[in-house]
Image (tube, rainbow, N blue to C red):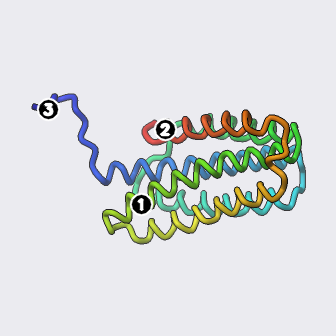
Amino acid sequence: MKSSFTKITSKNDKISDMIRVNQAGEFGAQKIYEGQLAVLHNDKTIREMLEQEKIHLETFNKILIKRGIRPTALSPIWSVGGYLLGAATALVGRKAAMACTVAVEEVIEKHYKEQQDMLEKDNKEKELIKIIEKFRNEEIEHRNTALDHDAEDTQGYELMTKSIKKITKLAIFLSKKI
């Protein structure tokens, strides 16, 4: 017998959570790159990645509005936190900024892949699947670009990327419901 306190989560709730967290993630990614550019100024590679993240954020903003999904209440925290993470890693150096990109994008790529797999099982939400697949591929490109720009050569790479991955996973977890 189910308790009256047991929450039953519908597929629509899961999709709403998915869209909410994706919008929050793209918002955070944009803030990370803005923080990096505040230190590294007109770094062409970072600017190009930022421009793609702006498109990702705009897309998820439109989906939120169209579906009447509220954004995460944590956006002010992600704004400051993302910007500070970007600026802090850039202050260490360009390679550290690239290591930050590797860490974040590896988590996001896996996150998007899990979402894509879940949606494909239901064989619904075809447009959302296409968007997630496209953005996932672009996040993989960002990771590969960062690796090509010597991310792994930054001092303390393993510790830095493990820490940033944990922060990113926590942000995903919190943004789903809050």
Q: Is residue 10 left or right of residue 66?
A: left
Q: CA distance from mark 3 to mark 1?
A: 29 Å
Residue at 74%, 40% in the rendered image? 83
For discs 2 and 1, the disc positioned in front in the rendered view: 1
- What percent of the width, then of the height, locates residue 147? 77, 55
Amino acid type at mark 3: Lys
Q: Can you say whether 50 is above or below 83 in the image?
A: below
In whole angstroms, how far apart are the C-alphas of marks 3 and 2?
25 Å
The image quadrant where one finds the N terminus is: top left
Task: Report the residue at 85% width, 37% height from top.
Answer: 155
Indicate the position of residue 66 as horizontal and vertical percent values. Answer: 43, 62
- The residue tagged 1 is 117
Say which element carries label 3. Answer: loop
Mark 2 or mark 3, which is nearer the start of the sequence? Answer: 3
Closest to the observer: 129 or 39? 129
Which amino acid does the dot numbered 2 rest on? Phe
Between 7 and 97, the one nearer to me in the picture:
97
Q: Residues within 10 Å of mark 2 (few under 14, many from 20)?
A: few
Q: Which numbered circle lies on residue 2? A: 3
Looking at the image, residue 162 lies above or below residue 42: above
Q: Secondary structure at mark 2?
A: helix
**Badge 3 density bin: few <14, some 14–19, many ≥20, Cα 10 Å:** few
Q: Residue at x 89, y 48 (%)?
A: 40
Disc on the earlier residue, 2 or 1: 1
Residue 111, percent from left and from top: 51, 51
Q: Secondary structure at mark 1?
A: helix
**Above or below, comparing residue 124 to residue 42 in the picture:** below
Write down the residue under mark 2. Answer: 173
Mark 2 to mark 1: distance in Å? 18 Å
* Mark 1 residue type: Asp
